[in-house]
Image (cartoon, rainbow, N blue to C red):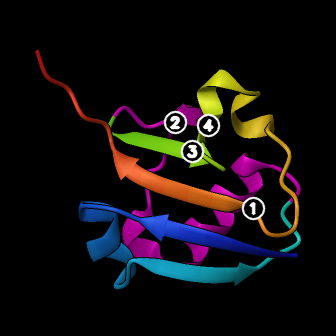
Amino acid sequence: MELECAFFGPFRDSVGMKTVVVDTDAEAVGDLLAELTERYPELEGRLREDGELAGEVVVTLNGSHVQHESGFETSLSDGDVIRVSPAVYGG
């Protein structure tokens, strides 16, 4: 299946481009993140930490934060859009 993956901030720097189209067999978000880390070694340790999303990252699937879905187990479908961005804090 084909997925669109968009990267923001320092993640874009690690990948070298804003958007990539990934042809993948990944069935869930966690599988995709592992695959992206393999393809782009500079992402190593920046997306996953102790089996969860790293503290500095927000991953959305079609506009919904995956942590509000099933986390790494959130299912993927052909044509989905994944966005990887740094967490934003403020007050």
Q: Name the residue under label 1.
A: 80
Could you tell me the amino acid type at mark 3?
Answer: Thr
| Identity of the residue drawn at 87% across and 68% down | 78
Q: Do the residues labelled 3 and 1 touch (CB within 8 Å)?
A: no
| Identity of the residue drawn at 57% across and 69% down | 5
The numbered mark, 2 or 1, whose residue comes first in the sequence reads 2
Q: Mark 2 points at which residue?
A: 53
**Can residue 77 be seen by looking at this rendering?**
yes
The disc placed on residue 64 is 4
Q: Marks 2 and 1, how far apart in space?
A: 19 Å
Judged by depth in the image, the label closer to the viewer, 4 or 2, is 4
Q: Name the residue under label 3.
A: 60
Could you tell me the amino acid type at mark 2?
Answer: Leu
Give coordinates of residue 62: x percent, y percent.
66, 50
**Can residue 46 be seen by looking at this rendering?**
no
Tell whether 27 sits left or right of 2. right
Give coordinates of residue 1: x percent, y percent.
88, 76
Q: Do the residues labelled 3 and 4 touch (CB within 8 Å)?
A: yes
When asked about the image quadrant of residue 81, the answer is: bottom right
